[in-house]
């Protein structure tokens, strides 16, 4: 009986520790790199980053009064537009990296200089300057280490597909890339 009680207490402590260790912080920085950029573009303004939280959209859920539903909107992907076979040929490719704080914070706390950013999600992005439309690719296991980084944060079940980017993301990233 004492052994069962000790195991039960140990298991409870382990579950509590793992829950706090897996807590999701807010996105505090986004970098765009590649396709001839001299230096990576860094976006760290909390008001610009706010709509582009990694933990939004498919693979997430929201519960209100014990009724849960899967996320359908958010991040930088226009989920409702569905898959895109491939973006138009000849577009420049960029790697977009999302960094989050080590611990959950409020939006005001993101302005703190003491936050330690960690990479939580990486996607590929191509932007068509003539139409203003961008495309986002969620890496798969056969691509490289980006898949492992992404799925350790969130598994969407939609990896290995191209999607249209949201207008809000294109309106931020497009002009930055054009410079």
Image (cartoon, rainbow, N blue to C red):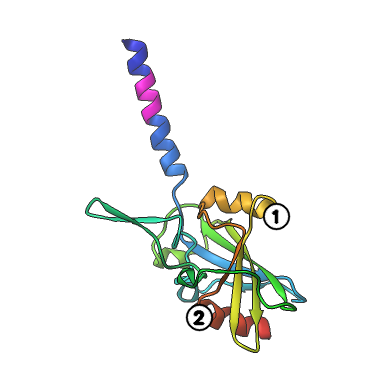
What residue do we see at 44% from left, 49% from top?
Answer: 23
Under circle 1, the secondary element is loop
- Which disc number belongs to residue 114? none
Q: Please state which of residues 80 and 24 is positioned toward the viewer in this rendering.
A: 80
| Quarter of the image with the N terminus in it | top left
Instruction: Work out how far the residue at label 1 is from the one at label 2, CA to CA, in angstroms.
Output: 27 Å
- Which residue lies under the disc numbered 1? 143
Q: Position of residue 21 (x, y in %)?
A: 47, 43
- Which residue extends farthest left? 65
- Place residue 117 in its image quadrant: bottom right
What residue do we see at 56% from left, 50% from top?
Answer: 151
- Vertical placement of 43 versus 154: above or below? below
- Which disc number belongs to residue 167? 2
Q: Position of residue 163 (x, y in %)?
A: 56, 69
What residue do we see at 65% from left, 55% from top?
Answer: 146
What range is drawn magenta here? 7-12
Q: Looking at the image, is mark 1 or mark 2 earlier in the sequence?
A: 1
| Quarter of the image with the C terminus in it | bottom right
Task: From the viewer's perspective, tell me whether residue 26 is left or right of residue 143.
Answer: left
Characterize the local packing of mark 1: few (<14), some (14-19) or many (20 or more) Cα atoms within 10 angstroms: few
Task: From the viewer's perspective, tell me whether residue 138 is left or right of residue 25.
Answer: right
What residue do we see at 56% from left, 61% from top?
Answer: 99
- Vertical placement of 3 versus 59: above or below? above
Q: Are marks 1 and 2 in contact (CB under 8 Å)?
A: no
Under circle 2, the secondary element is helix
Is 162 in the magenta?
Answer: no
- Which residue extends farthest bottom? 130
Is 9 in the magenta?
Answer: yes
- Place residue 44 in its image quadrant: bottom right
């Amino acid at each position: 009986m004492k052994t069962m009680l000790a195991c039960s207490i140990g298991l409870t402590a382990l579950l509590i520790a793992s829950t706090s260790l897996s807590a999701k912080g807010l996105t505090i920085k986004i970098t765009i790199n590649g396709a001839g950029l001299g230096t990576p573009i860094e976006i760290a303004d909390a008001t610009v980053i706010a709509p582009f939280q990694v933990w939004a959209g498919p693979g997430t859920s929201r519960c209100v009064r014990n009724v849960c539903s899967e996320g359908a909107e958010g991040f930088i992907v226009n989920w409702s537009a569905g898959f895109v076979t491939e973006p138009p040929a000849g577009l420049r490719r960029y790697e977009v990296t999302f960094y989050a704080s080590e611990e959950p914070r409020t939006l005001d706390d993101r302005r703190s200089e003491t936050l330690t950013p960690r990479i939580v999600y990486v996607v590929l992005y191509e932007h068509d300057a003539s139409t203003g439309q961008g495309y986002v690719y969620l890496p798969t296991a056969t691509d490289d280490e980006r898949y492992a980084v992404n799925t350790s944060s969130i598994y969407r079940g939609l990896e290995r597909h191209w999607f249209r980017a949201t207008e809000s993301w294109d309106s931020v990233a497009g002009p930055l890339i054009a410079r």
